Image (tube, grey):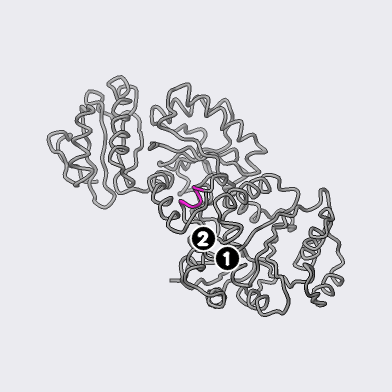
Amino acid sequence: MAYRSYLMVCGGTGCVANQSMKIRDRLKTEIEKRGLQQEISIVTTGCNGFCAVGPLMVVQPEGIFYQLIKESDIPRIVEEHLIKGQPVKELLYTPPGNGRFIPRMVDIPFFSDQSLVVLRNRGLIDPERIDEAIGRGAYEALAKVLTTMKPEEVIAEIKASGLRGRGGGGFPTGIKWETCRNAPGDPKYVICNADEGDPGAFMDRSTVESDPHAVIEGMCIGGYAVGSTEGYVYIRNEYPIALERLTTAIRQAREKGLLGKNIFDKGFDFDIRIIRGAPGEVRPYRGTGTLGQAVLSEQRGDVGQCSPDYPEWRQVVCQHRNGGRHGGPLGRKQRDQGLLALRKGQQYRTDRSPNGYYAAQNHL
Amino acid sequence: MKLMIEDLAKIREQYRHTFAVRQGTGRVRITVHTGECGIKAGARGIMSAVMGEIESRRLHDVIVTNAGCSGQCDQEPVISVETTSGLTMTRYIHMTPDKVKRVFDSHVMRGEVVQNLAAGGDKNR
C-alpha cells in the first residue's frame, strides 16, 4: 500500500520520557477517526538528537518539524495540516531569541549542519522492523565482505580508511582488528562497548535506539575480520529503551539467519549476546579491560558484576589458557563505522568537526 | 525464514517508494490543494485518485503533498505537478479522477504537460 504521508514520531529516550508514545497513540486514534489510515502512516523512530524540544515529530514528505507537542495539539495538527494542508505555526521550531519559525527540519541549524554517516538512518526507520533497515541497505556490507573479501582484505580496507575509535584514545580501528587477528589463542571475542559512562553523552544510546542493525552488522564484519564467532554488547542498565531495541533487533536478525550459523550460506557463524551493566552501579569509564572481565563473568554464570580488577583481567588474557572458553584475546569493536567504509568501498577520513567531535567523513 | 543475499536487494526495492516519501525526494512532486474550497469541490477524491495511480503504476519516485487554498477557489480541485529535474510547475484545474489519469499518462510518465487541463499553460518557476 502506498502512503501519501509518513508521520515520523520520535521514540528516543528523551521524547518517550516526555510522553511521545502517548502522542503517537493519540495520533493513531485521530487519524482513524478522520478516515486517513490508508493515506497516512505513523512510524516510531529512534532518537533524533534534539531532545530538548521533544516530543517531536516530522511530517514527510514535506519535512515539517513539530516540537514540544502536547496531546491536546493532535486534533489541530490532523485537521489543519494533514487534512487541509496548513502546518500549525505555533508548533514549529523557533530559534531562541528570534521570533521567526523554521518549518522544515532540513533548515533548522541543529540538523542542517549535520553530515550523517553513522546515524544515516536517524529518524528514517522504525528500529524494531528489520525490513526497514534492510530497505536502507543493512547487511549489504556484510554480504559484500562474505562474498568478495578475505579477512585480511577487510582489515586492510579499515586501515586504509583511517577509521579511529570513539573512545578518548582515538585508537586506529584497523590496527586493533589486525592485532586481535594476529594474537595467538582461541576463541576470540568481539565486544561492543555501549556502556557510555561519559556524563551527559548519549551518542551511543542514540545509535542503538535509532539503528541497532548497524551495530549488529558492524560486529559481524568485525568478527569475520578478526576470526571470532562470538560477539557481546555490554550495554548500561540505564538505557532500557536501547536495550529493548537491541534485543528485538538481535532476535529478528537471528530469525532471518543474519546471526547464527552459516550466515548467507557462506560458512560464517556469528552470534551476539547482550550483557547488562548491573543496576545502580556507580563506576568510572569502562574500557576494554573491565568489559573483558564482564564477559568472563557472564560466561562463568555470574550476574553481570564487573570488578575493577583490571590487572587481574590482563593476567587472565596473557595466560592464554588453551582449550577453555576463557583467556581468548579481545577485539574491541567500533561497531558501525567499519561497515560504512566497506559498504562504500571508499576512503574515509576522520576529521575533527568544529564542535570537537570525531566524525568520519566521506572522502571523495 | 532465512534470508539469502539476493533477498536483500528485493527488500530494498520494495521500500524504494517508502523512503522516497520519508526523505521527501522524488522525480515528480504532486501537490493537491485541500483548503476548505478544495475539499468542498472534491479534493479528497482527487487525493485518492492520485494515490491510486501511484499504487497501480507501482511508481517509486512520485511523492504527494497537500497544501491549503490554491488562491483560485473557482478552479478547485487544483493540483500542481512539479518535476524536480525540470524547472516547470504546472497547475491543473477543475480536476476529476479521469483527468488525474490523463495527467499521469502524459505528464508524470512522459513529461508532457497536458495543455488543455492546465491553468493558462506552463508557468516557469
- Secondary structure beneath dot 2 equals loop
Output the chain of dot 1.
Answer: A
Picture mark count: 2
- Secondary structure beneath dot 1 equals strand
The amino acid type found where label 1 is placed reads Phe
The answer to whether the residue labelled 2 contacts the one labelled 1, judged by CB atoms less than 8 Å apart, is yes
User: For the residues marked 2 and 1, what is the alpha-carbon distance in whole angstroms?
Assistant: 8 Å
Within-10-Å neighbours for mark 2: few <14, some 14–19, many 20+: many
Residue in the image at 46% along x and 49% along y: A106
Rendered image quadrant of residue A12? top right
Name the residue carrying label 2.
Answer: A264
Q: In this view, does A225 lie above or below A45?
A: below
Q: Position of residue A168 (x, y in %)?
A: 70, 68
Q: Position of residue A279 (x, y in %)?
A: 81, 48
Residue in the image at 54% along x and 39% along y: A9
The amino acid type found where label 2 is placed reads Phe
- The question of residue A45 being in magenta is answered with no
Q: Main secondary structure of the magenta part?
A: helix
Q: Which of A251 and A333 is in front in this view?
A: A251
Quadrant, the C terminus of chain A: bottom left
- The question of residue A134 being in magenta is answered with yes
Output the chain of dot 2.
Answer: A
> Do circles 2 and 1 both sit on a common chain?
yes
Residue that protrudes farthest toward the left in the picture: B116
Name the residue carrying label 1.
Answer: A268
Q: Which residues make up the magenta segment?
A: A131-135
Residue in the image at 67% along x and 38% along y: A17
Q: In this view, does A8 lie above or below B71?
A: below
Q: Which of B2 and A226 is in front in this view?
A: B2
Rendered image quadrant of residue B55? top left
